[in-house]
Image (tube, helix red, strand yellow):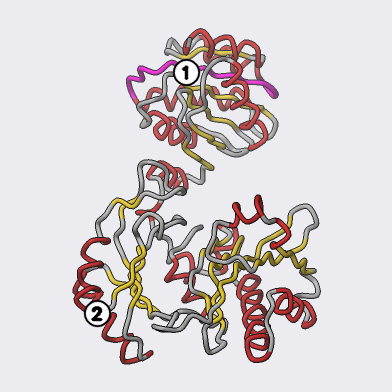
């Protein structure tokens, strides 16, 4: 689950990570009040107005601006709130900005002796260890740094059983070229950051930039946090941070029925039980001349309710010309799935999009018979080639 920058910073601060202070606002008036409050609490005379959306590259898209007066805070907040912000991560459709973060200016007017670093914590799935990735080239797209100057990216693997050791935190500070007070502050920062990552059950913490101020403080100026959905039951306060307005409506609807759904841009909807089979099904669709319109895994317990929910979500996509239901009957019997398809079809009503149902495994023949004798606009198949040929006939 992705969360906003201001929420990520709240989590970081609760674990002792030093952050750029800020207050979120959803109207220009509240933005001015937030700026006044920050001026009292931090002494800042300038403010950064930052759009809050689940995407990077906000500054390049015009979603991050510096205000040097309260009037500018109001003007910039008025311009940014409600805007459709387009970045390299939002795609051409962009995202509507509903909130802004009014943050203190931590670059101190007139001061130039600062450094920006990149730092992230995530799981290295190849080694089964956590990894801290960091670079002296903060403030830039890390992908560009990796491509053009890979020697400037450092990696520190951490054994989950041992945790981050003191010498590793010091090594990171050393590789970033720090000394004196800044060195000490960075070791504290890294230690607190790793603790936050582990204890929140996060999939990723990314801070770009980590700032060394002119007076040698180390601060998180940004925060991109991804929380592990599977662990949210342990963190109800974090689960409450979910912003449904930032998510695809179809994916939100799918999650209510415990369906794993990702929307794509193709013309053939697919419904499958099992992530591996879903990937193979998407390959079949492409080889047949179509393009997958979604990834939809109904899991091992497919029944009439889940099939109906999945069909409704797929049918809401106007680009879908056909639907391929590909079920392997291992845990669930194929005849049970077939009955579920027929029942769901009748509950939904008239469906103009042709549906291909490929059943293989336990009671596959019985399932095919149920589909063939249903009298509905549903085509049955047992082999992958049969399903592929039917898709090809429909989309080409």
Q: Could you tell whether 128 is left or right of 102 in the image?
A: right
- Residue at the spot 52% in from the left edge and 65% down from the top edge: 139
Observer-nearest residue: 393 or 369? Answer: 393
Q: Is residue 62 above or below residue 338?
A: below
State the residue in front, 127 or 207.
207
Instruction: Please state the horizontal and vertical placement of residue 3, each as a whole percent of the image.
Output: 46, 62
Q: How far is disc 1 from disc 2 in space, using C-alphas? A: 60 Å
Q: Which residues are magenta?
A: 349-363
Where is residue 317, by image quadrant?
top left
Q: Identify the residue at horizontal 67%, vertical 14% (top origin).
A: 383
Image coords of residue 244 (percent x, y): 38, 55
User: Label 2 neighbourhood size at 10 Å, few (<14), some (14-19), many (20+)?
Assistant: some
Q: Is residue 213 visible?
A: yes
Residue wearing tag 2: 69
Crowd class of label 1 (few under 14; some 14 to 19; many from 20; radius 10 Å): many
Quarter of the view holding residue 102 = bottom left
Q: Nearer the viewer, residue 357 or 384?
A: 384
Residue 361 magenta: yes
Q: Is residue 187 left or right of residue 142?
A: right
| Residue 201 seen anywhere in this rendered image of the structure | no
Q: Which residue is mark 1?
A: 355
Q: Nearer the viewer, residue 26 or 168?
A: 168
Q: Image quadrant of residue 274?
A: top right
The first of marks 1 and 2 along the sequence is: 2
């Amino acid at each position: 689950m992705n969360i906003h920058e201001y929420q990520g910073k709240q989590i970081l601060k609760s674990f002792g990570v030093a952050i750029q202070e800020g207050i979120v606002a959803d109207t220009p008036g509240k933005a001015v009040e937030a700026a006044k409050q920050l001026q009292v609490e931090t002494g800042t005379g300038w403010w950064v107005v930052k759009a809050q959306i689940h995407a990077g590259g906000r500054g390049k898209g015009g979603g991050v601006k510096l205000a040097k007066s309260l009037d500018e805070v109001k003007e910039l907040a008025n311009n940014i709130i409600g805007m459709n912000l387009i970045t390299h991560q939002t795609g051409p459709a962009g995202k509507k900005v509903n909130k802004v973060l009014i943050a203190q200016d931590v670059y101190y007017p007139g001061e130039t002796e600062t450094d920006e670093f990149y730092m992230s914590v995530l799981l290295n799935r190849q080694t089964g260890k956590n990894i801290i990735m960091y670079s002296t080239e903060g403030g830039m797209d890390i992908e560009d740094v990796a491509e053009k100057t890979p020697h400037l990216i450092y990696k520190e693997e951490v054994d989950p059983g041992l945790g981050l050791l003191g010498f590793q935190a010091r090594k990171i500070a050393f590789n970033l070229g720090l000394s004196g007070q800044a060195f000490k502050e960075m070791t504290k920062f890294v230690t607190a950051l790793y603790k936050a990552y582990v204890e929140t059950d996060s999939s990723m913490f990314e801070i770009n930039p980590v700032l060394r101020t002119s007076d040698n403080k180390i601060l998180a100026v940004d925060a991109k946090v991804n929380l592990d959905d599977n662990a949210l039951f342990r963190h109800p306060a974090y689960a409450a941070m979910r912003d449904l307005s930032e998510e695809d409506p179809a994916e939100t609807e799918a999650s209510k029925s415990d369906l794993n759904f990702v929307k794509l841009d193709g013309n053939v909807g697919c419904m499958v039980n099992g992530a591996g089979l879903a990937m193979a099904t998407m390959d079949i669709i492409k080889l047949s001349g179509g393009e997958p319109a979604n990834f939809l895994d109904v899991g091992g317990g497919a029944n009439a309710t889940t099939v109906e929910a999945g069909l409704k979500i797929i049918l809401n996509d106007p680009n879908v010309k056909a639907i391929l239901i590909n079920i392997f009957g291992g845990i669930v019997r194929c005849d049970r799935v077939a009955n579920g398809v027929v029942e769901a079809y009748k509950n939904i009503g008239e469906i103009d999009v042709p549906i291909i149902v490929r059943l293989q495994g336990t009671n596959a023949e019985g399932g095919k018979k149920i589909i063939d004798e249903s009298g509905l606009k549903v085509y049955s198949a047992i082999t992958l080639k049969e399903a592929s040929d039917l898709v090809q006939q429909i989309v080409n």
